Image (cartoon, rainbow, N blue to C red):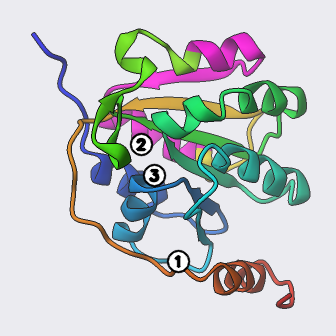
Amino acid sequence: MTEKRLNRRDVVARLVAGRDETVVIAGLGATTYDLAAAGDHPRNFYLWGAMGGAAMMGLGLALAQPALPVLVITGDGEMLMGLGAFATIALHNPRNLTIAVLDNESYAETGGQKTHTAYGTDLAAVAKACGIADAMTLRRLEEVDLLAVRAHALSEGTTVAAIKIAPGELPKVLPPRDGGFMTNRLRGALGFPPM
């Protein structure tokens, strides 16, 4: 019997519902479309390129703004590409950083080939082995709701959650693509002048 997986759009909508100050960084591809589908926001930053970079961008922002909750929403393919990020994040362990990895066990952007998670790689276990104590795998929406509460507050340290989602392509919801606009919009939302 195959396990029932969560709908990615439901997961992302729940993660960002009721947020106030939280900055949300979306990884390459589907997670960007999911965040846009949940509603564009001045504190959304869509990472159109740099596969594997979303978690490290989140770390940089979390370190630069320690009182500001930072939520990274990325995919299993992107996190696997930037797996070393877990070790660097663990070293700093910012209390304002949450990384939600939407794990459909496939590279959806390149044709649906299976990722290593389909063959047993456990991203939460990898994060724990790197030193991130608060790392877990989620399979129920109730667990996602609890993660959302954590993501919009400060904690004892970084949280990583691998969230098992259903495979399959959903209609693309395209947010702004202009990097300069995105940067200046986020800077403005944080009270900084444009670059």
**Does residue 76 sit above or below 189 in this rendering?**
above
Q: Quadrant of the C terminus?
A: bottom right
Disc 3 from disc 2: Cα separation: 7 Å
Q: Which residue is mark 1?
A: 41
Give residue 93's position: percent from left, percent from top.
83, 32
Provide the secondary structure element on which disc 2 rests: helix
- Identified at 14% across, 15% down, the residue is 2
Kindly identify which numbered label has been placed on residue 145. 2
**Does residue 42 sit above or below 106 in this rendering?**
below
Q: Quadrant of residue 110?
A: top left
**Three-letter residue code for mark 3:** Leu
Left or right: 26, with 191 as reference point: left
- Specify start and end residues of the magenta stretch as a single range: 125-150
**Three-letter residue code for mark 2:** Asp
Q: Is residue 81 magenta?
A: no
Provide the secondary structure element on which disc 3 rests: helix
Q: Which residue is mark 3?
A: 15
Left or right: 39, with 6 as reference point: right
**Three-letter residue code for mark 1:** His
Q: Are marks 3 and 2 in contact (CB under 8 Å)?
A: no
- Identified at 86% across, 84% down, the residue is 192
- Identified at 40% across, 74% down, the residue is 39
